Image: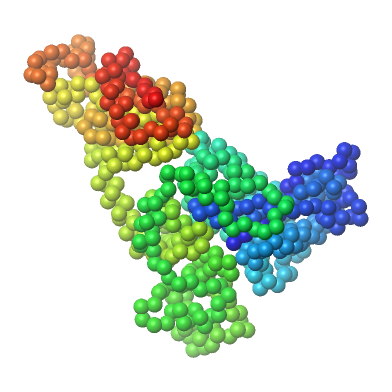
Amino acid sequence: MTVLTTRMAGTIAGPAGADRSRPCGDGWPSAVAALRVAFQPIVQMRTGRCHGFEALLQGFERTGFADAAALLDAAEAAGALATVESALHAKAVAAYRALPGWGEATLFLRLDARLVGRPDQPWLARDPAASRRAGVVLELSGRHPMGEGVALDAAIDRCRQSGVGIALDDFGAGHASLRTLYEARPDYVKIGRFFIAGIDGDARKRALVAALAGHAHALGIQIVADGVETATEFYTCRDLGCDFAQGALIAGPDAGLTALPNRCAAVEDLNRRDRRQPGEAHRRLSEVIERLPVLRVDSRKTELLDYFKGDGSASIAPIVDEQDRPLGLIRERDLKRFVYSRFGGELLRNRGLGDRLDDLVIRSPVCDISTPLDRVIEAFSTESANDGIVIVEGGAYAGVLSSAALLRLVHERNLAMATDQNPLTRLPGNAAIVRHIDQALADTGRGHVLAYLDFDNFKPFNDTFGFRQGDRAILMFSERLKAWTAGTGGGADGFAGHIGGDDFFLAVSGGAEGEALARLAELLAQFRSDAESLYDADTRVAGGFLAKDRYGAERRFPLLAASGVAVVIPPGGHGLTPDAINAAIADHKAAAKSADDKLCVVRPA
């Protein structure tokens, strides 16, 4: 499936002294004819399949305009915006259809928002069947607001009746707002470079993109990460739930293509080299999804009636478009008003009323089969998933996750969490800690600090003051750990776990190493102060207490404190293993307990 977008954003300035407000030569046709079209691939992130291509217009130095924005603004001022936009669309379509493989494509054409809802808007007069065969999607630019009084939802409905789909470009910038997302009900949302740049090191960007991906997928919308330039940006966007990627890392615009490639070697190589492949999610979803047969949206309605015939037939039918892209579901119960009415069957068979399935399709949540299970559960445990979730693999239909299967996954997740959660502190236990260490070692794009923390002389304290006070100390420290991870900033992610007893684990990924170590030392100092509240006044003044050591001899012990070994892993990882981390911690526990600040920092070779 190929995607083509006329992102008319030329970057080449016109000749010195050129009049940037008027077309060159014999007018608008001359300006449009002077442009050339280059293609940049949009790639499915988990498979490397070329989902499509964006068309970029180049050669503005020959038009008398600095860029596409100047061209379109001048056209609008002259009352010719629709004419020029239609000509640019025609040029992009002609260049696209000259390349082998265009018939399997989804063609994205950028549409100036000032034209939305106007009678002269491009494509409204087109043959709907021809538009659908070409797989046309109009991409709404957020550079300008729509006209006053335009009802966007009604305008979008007219577009869809013309056989085209809808996308939002550069979402989150300009006029591409949440309200536009709500009213337009697009098929695609493209997240612009501002949110993609440095996302691997920016926790706020990651949170925003993850929330948008979850919301969009619940509405059946697919996400394109636009402007991906580094491997760590690619992995982060993929793991946050983005479906497609585009940018310099994948490939730049190419005006010399003789055919449209269907695979992207760069993305395939990125996935091969990534050790964080979510194989468990892929395996589990493969086990629980129902691989229901699909119907194409151009199927006759009589085929739909046949689909639901017979005992044991499915109650829903997955519907795909002419390029096999999932559109949603048709529910058997919605046909009852036809089937059980006197002339219902005849109405469904009446081709004069339309013989396609478009008007019966219900938009369904869409999820990639390799999406981590926690993200599937969090994103789709909503009313929007009542009829099931369409599961895709490589952008193509794979099956349907029923509401019953989703509930089963929720139950499995809750049971696993309860099993692996410390009953006293409610912090993640050993299995989660091991997984976190493995993920950190695989995440070579960021630096990590992995810390083992435990109390000094906890047994004498517990024996002397009782288990209740011991539990109070553990809970006090666990609350400090939770606050510490919640306060992690500067583009870093924090994680806290409870190994058992007075043994804890703390980690920070990304951000500044010095800041993480300083906060860790501060945490240990705060606990020393907190622990004083566990003693009576006389013990606090004395600075310690008498108790028996492990050999039965009575001696004085200091007030309770915690110490830690922090293992620093630089970006790149340098081949460290979990065994190497454990050995480094074991070798430096004594040094941590004897340090003035109770912290020993280790940088393994």
Residue at screen point 45% across, 22% down = 514
Task: Using the rendered image of the protein, determine whether residue 29 is visible from the camera's viewpoint.
Answer: yes
- Left or right: residue 368 compared with residue 537: right
Quarter of the figure with the C terminus: top left
**Residue that protrudes farthest toward the left in the picture:** 552
**Residue that protrudes farthest toward the right in the picture:** 26
Residue at screen point 56% across, 50% down = 265
Foreground of the two, 302 or 53: 53
- Left or right: residue 463 compared with residue 516: left
**Residue that protrudes farthest toward the top in the picture:** 542
Task: Using the rendered image of the protein, determine whether residue 337 is visible from the camera's viewpoint.
Answer: no
**Residue 400 to residue 243: above or below:** below
Q: Position of residue 303 (x, y in %)?
A: 51, 81
Number of marks in picture: 0
Q: Position of residue 189 (x, y in %)?
A: 58, 53
Foreground of the two, 460 or 252: 252
Q: Position of residue 214 (x, y in %)?
A: 48, 51
Residue at screen point 57% across, 68% down = 321
Q: Position of residue 533 (x, y in %)?
A: 24, 21
